[in-house]
Amino acid sequence: MVTYLCKIAGVSRTGYYAWCEAEDLRSSREEQDWQDFMLIETVFNAKKQKAGFRTIQMILENDHQIKMNHKKILRLMKKFNLVTKVRSMKPYRKLAKATQEHKTLPNQLNRQFHQTEPGKVLLTDITYTYFGGGQPAYLSTVKDVATREIVAFEVSRSLSMDIAYNTLNKLINASDGYLHPEAMLHSDQGFHYTHPEFQKRVKTAGFQQSMSRKGNCLDNAPMESFFGHFKDEVDFKQCKTFEELHGMISEYIEEYNTQRYQYGLNKMTPEQFRGHLLAA
């Protein structure tokens, strides 16, 4: 009968008996998969279901001292149907119209995003958020390319030039009197950054200014990447007041700088990686 059934199933007798003998091993593996999945799910839910397999791997390794292969994490996420929430694409929105007095500058950075000196190359940009059932607000940030830290930010209800001026002032204050001799501030060709007064203040502060090519977001890709993560992970639409939104953004940036492990930073946080680069 076994031979007959094996023939119908298209398997060999040897294979069938080997499968029977491995039942305990399969059960053990299933139990181990379940235990590992419970750890993965804990991190996944703590990150509001917005963490990918690499992020989960780094959190397990750094916060829980558990080493788990990223391929295993990906396999278990697929097996137990853990799907990371991904933001929907939004069309680019032009913030304001430049006048003839505004001046674009060459792309001095030219996508040289691999930097090893903190403070040498800084990226800046502005994105939009919402609060109180659809009221707009704007977030301006400066990111250090070498460490991926957000070193300065400003949240505003308005897109006036003050958002760019205030961000620049916070960047200067964050430098604490030390400015890299080759410090560069790179941005897109937005209204704020081509404004003659802003360019004057950047030069006075000691920064070389660089701009992306027109309509090419890849020239400022690390900054766009941060905004993407921010909009994925921060439920800012639940904020009822501007003050609540400001607090939520401040908390996220603090967590991003000090607690978010990044694969490209040797699995360190931006703050830890800055210390690593300075020590080196």
Image (cartoon, rainbow, N blue to C red):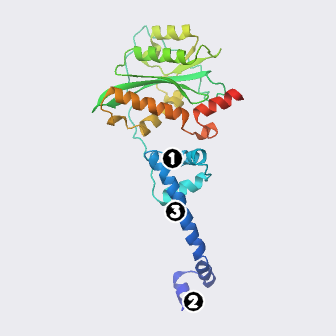
**Which quadrant holds residue 274?**
top right
Vertical arrangement, residue 16 with respect to residue 36, above or below = below
Picture residue at 45% right of the left edge, 32% below the top: 251
In this rendering, position of residue 95 left or right of residue 56: left
Q: Are marks 1 and 3 in contact (CB under 8 Å)?
A: no
Gap in Å between the C-alphas at discs 2 and 1? 47 Å
Q: Are marks 2 and 1 in contact (CB under 8 Å)?
A: no
Gap in Å between the C-alphas at discs 1 and 3? 19 Å
Q: Disc 2 marks which amino acid?
A: Thr
Q: Are marks 2 and 3 in contact (CB under 8 Å)?
A: no
Label 3 element class:
helix
Give me the disc on residue 3: 2
Give me the disc on residue 184: none
Disc number lying in front (2 or 1) = 1
Q: Is residue 92 visible?
A: no
- Quarter of the figure that contains the N terminus: bottom right
**Which quadrant holds residue 32?**
bottom right
Disc with the residue nearer the chain's start (2 vs 1): 2
**Which quadrant holds residue 16?**
bottom right
Vertical arrangement, residue 23 with respect to residue 211, above or below = below
**Percent from the top left, x then y, of residue 191?**
42, 16
In this rendering, position of residue 137 left or right of residue 107: left
**Percent from the top left, x then y, of residue 52?**
51, 47
Q: Residue furthest left?
A: 133
Disc number lying in front (2 or 3) = 3
Q: Residues within 10 Å of mark 2 (few under 14, many from 20)?
A: few
Q: Residue furthest bottom?
A: 1
Disc number lying in front (1 or 3) = 3
Give me the disc on residue 52: 1
In this rendering, position of residue 200 left or right of residue 66: left
Residue behind mark 3:
34
